[in-house]
Image (cartoon, grey):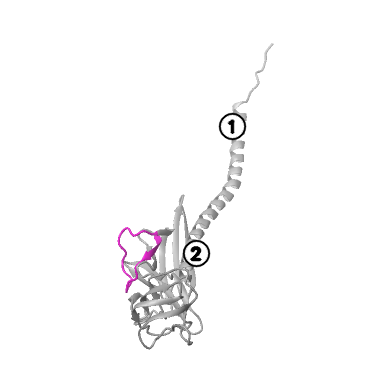
Amino acid sequence: MSTRQGGFTLIELVVALMISVVVVGFIATFIAVPVQSHLAQVRRSDLAASAEAVSYWMSQDVRGALPNSLRAGAVGGRPVVEMIDVAAVTIYRDAGTEGDTLDFAAPDNRFDILGLPAAVATHVVVDNRGTPGRNAYQLANVIAPAGVNVASSTITLTPAFRFVGPSTHRRAFLVSPATAVVRYECDLAARTLRRYDGQPMTAAIAALPAGTPSRLIARDVTGCTFTTRAGNTDHGGLLLIRVTISRVTNGAADTLRAMKQLKVEDAA
C-alpha cells in the first residue's frame, strides 16, 4: 500500500512567488506615491520656514529702525543691508512759555521732553533724513551726545548743539552709536544669510572683522538682493528683499524664490 506525502510542487511554488511579487509591486506602487508626496511636502515646508524666518527677523528690525537709516550695498561681493536700532523715542518741547524748548536757531544745551523714554542711550537724533548733511551715520548735524534727566524729563546736550532742522513730528530718537547698527549680510559662497547686531555706526558700509558674532537666519541661500526705495509725501519707503533658497535632499532638488516688500518708516 503506497502513501502520498503532502507538500508543494515546484510549479506551485513558482506560481506562489510570482503572485507574491505582483501583490508586493501593487502595494509598493500605492504606498510610494503618497510617501514621495509627503517627503516633497516636508522639503517645501522646510524651505518655506527658512523664507519665513528671513521675513520675520527683518520685519521686526525694520519696524524699530531709525527713520531714513536703511542703507543697502555690497561688501566683498556680499549683499548687505544696515539700519540703526532705536533705543527709545520721545517728543521734544518746541513751543510754549513753560519749560525749556529745543532751539534750532542756535546751539542749545537742554530741552524738555514729553514723557520719559523706556531706555537711556548716549546720543539723541532729531530729523534724520539719510541725505548728505542730515545723516545720523555721519555722526554730525542731526545727532549729538545727550543725557536724560529722569527727574525733570529733560535732555541735556554736552557740549551745546544746534540740530540742522526740526522734526516734522517733533520726535527725538535715542540711540547708542557704538552698538546701534543691525546688519543683514548674504554670503553666497557659504550659502548663508546672517544677522549682526550691536555694531558701531560708520559713515559707509564696511567689512566686519572676522569672527564677528552673528545669528544664522537662513542656509542654502543661492541668491540674494536688498533694494531700498525712498518714500514721498504720499507713502513711506520700501525695502525689497529677494532671497533664493536651493536645497538637495536625498537626490531631490527644491528651490524657493521669496520676495518681500517691507514698508519703511521715513517720517522723522
The location of residue 20, given as percent across then percent down, is 60, 36
Pointer 1: what residue? Answer: 14
Against 165, residue 219 (above or below) is above
Residue 21, quarter of picture: top right
- 90, 38: nearer the viewer: 90
Dominant SS of magenta comes to loop
Cα distance, mark 2 to mark 1? 62 Å
Q: Nearer the viewer, residue 117 or 232?
A: 117
Amino acid type, label 2: Tyr
Q: Does residue 211 appear to the left or right of 5 in the view shown?
A: left
Is 132 colored magenta in this rendering? no
Residue at left offset 69%, top offset 11%: 1
Point out the stretch of residues depicted in magenta. 192-214
The tag on residue 56 is 2
Q: Amino acid at mark 1?
A: Val
Q: Residue furthest top?
A: 1
Decide if residue 80 is on the left or right side of residue 7. Answer: left
